[in-house]
């Protein structure tokens, strides 16, 4: 009886240490899963958005995009509630707020590759 008590206690201590170690090793909260946008008419391929390629691990700033450009609880939804379309991106809204070679650098939204590099987002896999 006494032995089982100590075995359980040791198992609990090991579990707590394991959980604490995992929490300390993680630099960011768990990011949302990749989101695949439905392929639109005339689109050269599907677009998959990944937070891991858009979040700076050293200085995460979710507020650079949420809720300014995109809704936080509705994947793939701009603040206006419409669809993500090239006309809006070319007007420096939605993805075009950052993905615009001519955009001035903004600390919350650094310059990224431009909209003319279609194959960076559109994949026909």
Image (cartoon, helix red, strand yellow):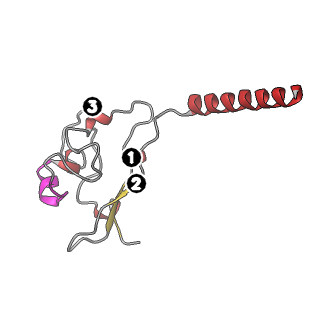
Sequence-first disc among 1 and 3: 1
Q: Position of residue 47 (x, y in %)?
A: 32, 62
Task: Out of 24 and 12, give the one closest to the viewer.
Answer: 12
Residue 100 visible from this viewpoint: no
Q: Position of residue 110 (x, y in %)?
A: 28, 38
Instruction: Categorize mark 2 by other alpha carbons within 10 Å: few (<14), some (14-19), many (20+).
Output: few
Instruction: Categorize mark 1 by other alpha carbons within 10 Å: few (<14), some (14-19), many (20+).
Output: some
Which residue is tagged 3?
107
Name the residue: 23% across, 45% down: 70
Which residue is tagged 2?
34
Q: Dot 2 lies on which element? A: loop
Q: Quadrant of the N terminus?
A: top right
Q: Is residue 54 left or right of residue 64?
A: right
Q: Quadrant of residue 36?
A: bottom left
Name the residue: 78% across, 31% down: 8
Task: State yes or no: residue 83 in magenta.
Answer: yes
Instruction: Categorize mark 3 by other alpha carbons within 10 Å: few (<14), some (14-19), many (20+).
Output: few
The label shown at residue 51 is 1
Which span of residues is magenta-colored? 82-92
Tell me if label 1 and label 2 are in contact, CB under 8 Å: yes
Query: Of tags 2 and 3, which is closer to the observer?
Result: 2
């Amino acid at each position: 009886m006494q032995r089982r008590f100590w075995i359980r206690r040791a198992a609990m201590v090991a579990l707590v240490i394991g959980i604490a170690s995992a929490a300390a090793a993680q630099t960011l909260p768990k990011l949302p899963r990749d989101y695949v946008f439905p392929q639109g008419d005339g689109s050269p391929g599907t677009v998959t958005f990944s937070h891991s390629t858009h979040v700076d691990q050293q200085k995460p700033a979710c507020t650079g995009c949420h809720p300014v450009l995109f809704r936080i609880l509705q994947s793939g939804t701009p603040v206006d509630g419409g669809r993500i379309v090239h006309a809006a991106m070319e007007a420096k809204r939605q993805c075009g707020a950052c993905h615009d070679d001519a955009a001035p650098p903004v600390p919350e939204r650094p310059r990224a590759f431009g909209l003319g590099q279609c194959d960076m987002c559109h994949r026909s896999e």
